[in-house]
Image (tube, rainbow, N blue to C red):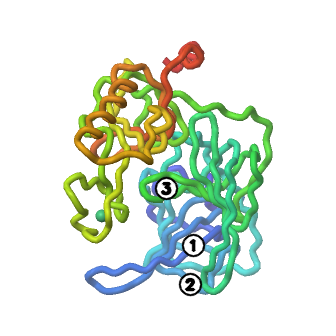
Amino acid sequence: MLKIAEIKDEIKFADITVKVVNIREKEYENEKGKGSYYYGIVGDETGTLPLTAWVFPSTVQAGDVIELKNCSVRKYNDRLRIYADSRSEVVLRPDDKMEVKRTYKEYKVKDLNLKDQYVAVSGIITGIEERTYEKDGRSGVVYSGIFADDTGTVRISSFGVKMKENLKARITGARVQEYRGRIRISINENSVITPIEMQKPGVPLYRISELSTGISGIEVTGICVMLGERSGLSMRCPECRKRVDDGNCQEHPDAKPYVDLYAYFTLEDGTSTMQCSIGREALAKFTGIKTESLEYTDDEIARIHGIIEEKIMGKPLLLKGESTTSPQGLSFRAEELTHIDSDVIKKVQAIMRMGID
Ligand SMILES: [Zn+2]
């Protein structure tokens, strides 16, 4: 009898008995019309694999043991996956019992990606917020917060399973998802949360050349080598937040634009350069510019640009925030900006001694 752990490569025809860990139906539409298929995770005592089934009895549920006759194993997104198609047969085995061994690859926050949808992570959970929601006439509680390890932070949410503030834990079976271009993780009743002993991680400092994906809750340092000439005062549409310096927003002509404060600049750290941006609150804090009194006149625009230039241009800076990637390349959104002082230099030197260099 074939076991999951024995599957190391693609197989044309296979018979395997597995337990359904989870299963979902997905509808699709193509030129031949509408249809649906099933996808999920199946496993046995030796491991788990994802399953895609074009034929599947709708009575089969999570927890059922099934025999997949004449299925195939193929690679999808670099991962092996079991396929049941029209030649295959799915037989329910109601009398069979099976324990599923789930194995999850250990991930650091910075390496989380959509190729591995269920993972193990270790870190600390903070900033927990609780919210009730309604779905299909039933209400539930969702907990959300920030999960941090020594490589960065990621948003975490939990449907139903309560999360404790400052909980240091290893989570196995966390689900990796993407929302508005950002990676996040979620836990559910199938995830296992084990408290662990660990130091509260500090904010990790990255070289620009080490960044190739979006990571939140990190620091970079460098010198501002170019300040965007339109940094400073800008008019923004309150509806879509687009910059509208020449009057009203074309899409929202009735919305009255407001005066905003914003800067963008190029940071160079000796390993590479990166485009950075900073918004009103953090920029006001860093420069001391009072935002309430700002008027959008030519004199004021020049004065504010001058203040920002004096504080940022050519200066060694420490930025806290998140890196993001887009078709335009890598960029950084600063939530906090500080001039580099002796404490910061000590931290940079300490990291270099750790051999990240
Ligand atoms: Zn608008």
Residue 17 point in image, percent of width and height? 64, 69
Ligand 1 quadrant assignment:
bottom left
Q: CA distance from mark 1 to mark 3?
A: 16 Å
The residue singled out by tag 1 in the image is 68
Residue at x 49%, y 69% (from the top left corner): 52
| Discs 2, 3 touching: Cβ within 8 Å | no
Front residue of this view, candidates 124 and 288: 288
Question: Which disc, if any, is residue 80?
Answer: 3
Residue 179 shows in this picture: yes
- Closer to the chain start, of discs 1 and 2, is 2
Q: Is residue 105 left or right of residue 335?
A: right
Q: Secondary structure at mark 3?
A: strand
At 56% from the left and 78% from the top, the residue drawn is 90
Q: Is residue 305 left or right of residue 17?
A: left
CA distance for labels 2 and 3 = 23 Å
Label 2 C-beta lies within 8 Å of the nearest ligand 1 atom: no
- Kind of element beneath mark 1: strand
Question: Seen in the image, is 73 located left or right of residue 304?
Answer: right
The residue under the point 69% across, 74% down is 140
Label 2 packing within 10 angstroms: few (<14), some (14-19), many (20+): few
Q: Residues within 10 Å of mark 3 (few under 14, many from 20)?
A: some
Q: Closer to the N terminus: mark 1 or mark 3?
A: 1
Pair 1/3: label in front: 3
- Label 2 amino acid? Pro
- The local secondary structure at tag 2 comes to loop
Earlier-in-chain disc, 2 versus 3: 2
* Amino acid type assigned to the residue bearing label 1 in the image: Leu
Residue that badge 2 annotates: 57
Amino acid type, mark 3:
Leu
